[in-house]
Image (cartoon, rainbow, N blue to C red):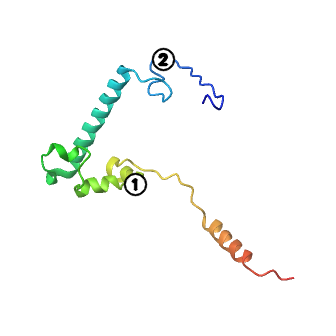
Amino acid sequence: MDKLGIQRRMHISGDNKDAFDPFSPETPQMTVHAQDMLDQIHTQFIDAVKQGCGNCLRDDPELCSGRARRTCSSVSRMASATPSYVAREVIKPDIVDYTQKESISERVVKRFGVSIEKLPCAR
């Protein structure tokens, strides 16, 4: 940043609004806070895996240590799940699809336009 003449400015509205800023020194309090958040998320993940897998998991602390290579099928499905799969199968809300669909006439016009474009020029 110095070589390019870039000045860093930060305006915040609270004491912790700049937490985890990569250009600020890390404080011991922020390190503790980050580890606490990671521990909570890891616990939630383990609980979700156990709930999803039922009895397919053995009671082994190494299983969710990050070193595990084999997973039950529920975890494998979760890992490869698309957002629409999660919405449909996990959250199960009343899903309303707001995606704009082409009308049949729009599709015909597009196809017709493409076919005309491919015609040799008659001069």
Question: x, y percentage for residue 93?
Answer: 37, 47
- At horizontal 42% and vertical 24% (from top left) the residue drawn is 26
For marks 1 and 2, the one nearer the N-term is 2
Q: In the figure, is residue 28 to the left or right of 60?
A: right
- At horizontal 26% and vertical 45% (from top left) the residue drawn is 66
Q: In the figure, is residue 11 to the left or right of 70?
A: right
The amino acid type found where label 2 is placed reads: Gly
| SS type, badge 2 | loop
Q: In the figure, is residue 17 to the left or right of 45?
A: right
The quadrant holding residue 123 is bottom right
Quarter occupied by the N terminus? top right
The residue wearing badge 1 is: 82
> Local crowd at mark 2 within 10 Å, few (<14), some, or many (≥20)?
few
Residue 85 position (above or below residue 117): above
> Local crowd at mark 1 within 10 Å, few (<14), some, or many (≥20)?
few
The residue wearing badge 2 is: 14
The amino acid type found where label 1 is placed reads: Thr
